[in-house]
Amino acid sequence: MDNYKNNYNNDKIKTDCREKKGDNAISNEKECEKNNLLSTQIGPISLPNPVILASGTCGYGLELIDLIDISSIGAIAVKGLSLLPRVGNPPPRIIETPCGLLNAIGLENVGIDDFLKRLLPIISSYTSRIIINILGDTALDYARLAKIIEENRDDAIIGIEVNISCPNVKEGGIAFGRSSKGAREVTGAVRGETGLPLIVKLSPNVADIVEIASSVQEAGADAVSLINTVLGMAIDIRKRRSRLSNIFGGLSGPCIRPIALRMVWEVTHSLSIPVIGVGGITSWRDAVEFFMAGASAVQVGTATLIEPDTGIQIIKGLERFMIKEGYNSVKDMKI
Ligand SMILES: Cc1cc2nc3c(=O)[nH]c(=O)nc-3n(C[C@H](O)[C@H](O)[C@H](O)COP(=O)(O)O)c2cc1C
């Protein structure tokens, strides 16, 4: 299965390069050489460059098509999808904090069926590398979602990313990702239903990130992405209440980068599972820090909300840095 997946993705990149040739053969040739330098392998997933747009910060991709060329991004991780559509939390549900953003969107989304039937055919005409982020209330929800995706396989779906930061309704609302038991349960449930590459997105709100990463690796994850948002809050001192309707929210942006970087380092220096670094990345320099910590790829989230072409600027800056410093692959940067 793994060999099949590797060959499948490598062939796809080569085909993409061949297809780009034609009138602009010379510039496209250069584009493909650049892709070779920037290309990365995340377990069974091959990407032409190591920059992914993070779930929840690029919508379903369509929101960005008038602003950037999404086909030049390594992959896009779409907004988390549940079995049924969700409206999310009432406002206020997003506020600025020093160097960051606090959000309690409440996982608003269109639901898996609408995404697969209506949105995927449109988005896949713009990019052939889509990661589907999923969420549920129970392990069974996650298993059902994986089964639906498996039954509707599309070449553009290069993997499933499992958001385990959601409350487990059967365990009193504690997030799956806050215990090894919950993390293992969800990962195993998804793995049982699909052969698609499986990325598990870890919550930073735990005492020992390596323990959680190890449990999802054992349960069949091909890679982990970390970190999701950090639990936080802000109080309106005049109104004497939380500034978010949900009281707590998830903190993202540059303020969480040192936490993310430390956790990526811990996992890459303890386990063999490939790691995608996420958290506060706003520039190619930030991305390089994550590659030096051992990440195989990075995701850009909040920064895209401020400047939609951040991901593209990171790819360009990264390439310049790699050529100047003599790196042949982002994995060479690990220290
Ligand atoms: C508004 C918003 C919505 C998000 N929605 C999701 C989601 O649906 N699923 C998920 O796994 N992560 C979600 N995230 C977390 C991001 O993908 C990312 O892990 C986090 O924001 C840290 O990266 P950043 O600092 O670059 O934003 C969301 C983040 C934000 C700011």
Image (spheres, rainbow, N blue to C red):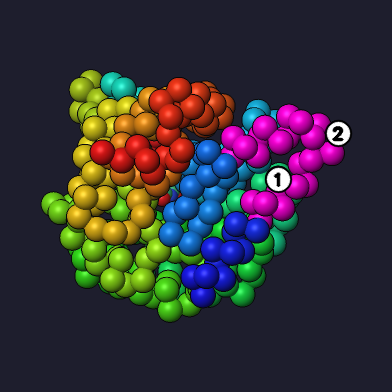
Q: Is residue 16 above or below residue 283?
A: below
Q: Which residue is mark 2?
A: 23
Left or right, residue 16 beside residue 253: right
Q: Residue at x 45, y 40 (%)?
A: 329
Q: Nearer the viewer, residue 275 or 249?
A: 275
Crowd rating for badge 1 (residues with CA inside 10 Å; few <14, some 14–19, many 20+): some
| Residue at the spot of label 1 | 17
Query: How far apart are the alpha carbons under marks 1 and 2?
Result: 13 Å
Q: Could you say which is closer to the camera, residue 135 or residue 220?
A: 220
Q: Amino acid at mark 2?
A: Asp
User: Which of the two labelled residues, at mark 1 and mark 2, occupies the earlier sequence position?
Assistant: 1
Q: Seen in the image, is 136 located left or right of residue 13?
A: left
Q: Which residue lies at the image location 26% right of the left edge and 50% below the top edge?
A: 268
Please tell me in which quadrant of the rendered image residue 61 appears. Answer: top right
Residue 119 spot, x, y in % from top left: 68, 53
| Residue 297 is covered by the magenta coloring | no
The quarter of the picture showing ligand 1: top left
Q: Amino acid at mark 1?
A: Cys
Tell me the residue at 30%/65% (across/down): 216
Q: Residues within 10 Å of mark 2 (few under 14, many from 20)?
A: few
| Image location (x, y in percent) of residue 188 | 35, 74
- Report the span colored magenta: 12-35
Extreme-left residue of the structure: 207
Q: Residue furthest bottom?
A: 192
- Residue 198 lies, in percent from the top left, at 44, 63
